[in-house]
Image (cartoon, rainbow, N blue to C red):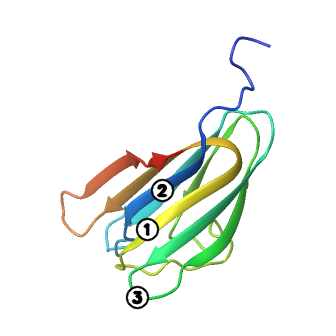
């Protein structure tokens, strides 16, 4: 095995305080949010998502798996990626991503409300 291959890297908890699923819009590119999870270790990562809202209790235990040495993109507008949960659009929330093994997590949002669109990604707070 080459140096660094299969070694678990990253952190086991990631926080993204500024989430809001934009409207899908009418363009070919649909407004969406994504969470990209990279598992550099050999073992499968059992990942749990928790959504925190301004006006109600958190939605907990959205569970997904990421195989070892793989990347997985979770589209937050796709209930199949969210273990059946439908994320409400145009509602402020925060996201916590936890894993039983170290992972690297990135958040992205595509907002198509304007013709020139807005796309950004960010790394969350982790420990």
Quadrant of the rendering where the C terminus is positioned = top right
In front of the other: 68 or 52: 52
Distance in Å between CA atoms under marks 1 and 3? 12 Å
Q: Position of residue 36 (x, y in %)?
A: 54, 49
Image point 63% across, 42% down: which residue?
103
Image point 49% across, 64% down: which residue?
95
Q: Residue beneath label 1, please?
A: 94
Say few, some or many: other residues with alpha carbon within 10 Å of mark 2 (under 14 / 14 to 19 / 20 or more). some
Image point 30% across, 64% down: which residue?
111
Q: Position of residue 19 (x, y in %)?
A: 39, 66
Q: Which label is found at residue 55? A: 3
Image point 56% across, 80% down: which residue?
86
Say few, some or many: other residues with alpha carbon within 10 Å of mark 3 (under 14 / 14 to 19 / 20 or more). few
The mark nearer the N terminus, 1 or 3, is 3
Against 108, residue 115 (above or below) is below
Q: Residue beneath label 2, please?
A: 15
Against 88, residue 127 (above or below) is above
| Image-based side of 53 in relation to 76, left or right | left
Q: Position of residue 51 (x, y in %)?
A: 52, 72
Secondary structure under tag 3 reads loop
């Amino acid at each position: 095995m080459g140096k660094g291959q299969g070694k678990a890297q990253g952190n086991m908890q990631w926080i993204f305080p500024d989430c809001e699923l934009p409207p899908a819009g009418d363009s070919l590119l649909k407004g969406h949010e994504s969470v990209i999870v990279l598992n550099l270790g050999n073992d499968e990562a059992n990942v749990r998502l928790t959504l925190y809202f301004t006006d109600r209790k958190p939605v907990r235990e959205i569970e997904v798996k990421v195989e070892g040495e793989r990347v997985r993109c979770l589209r937050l507008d796709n209930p199949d990626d969210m273990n059946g949960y439908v994320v409400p659009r145009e509602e402020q929330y925060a996201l916590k991503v936890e894993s039983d093994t170290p992972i690297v997590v990135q958040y992205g949002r595509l907002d198509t409300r304007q013709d020139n669109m807005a796309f950004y990604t960010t790394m969350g707070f982790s420990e």
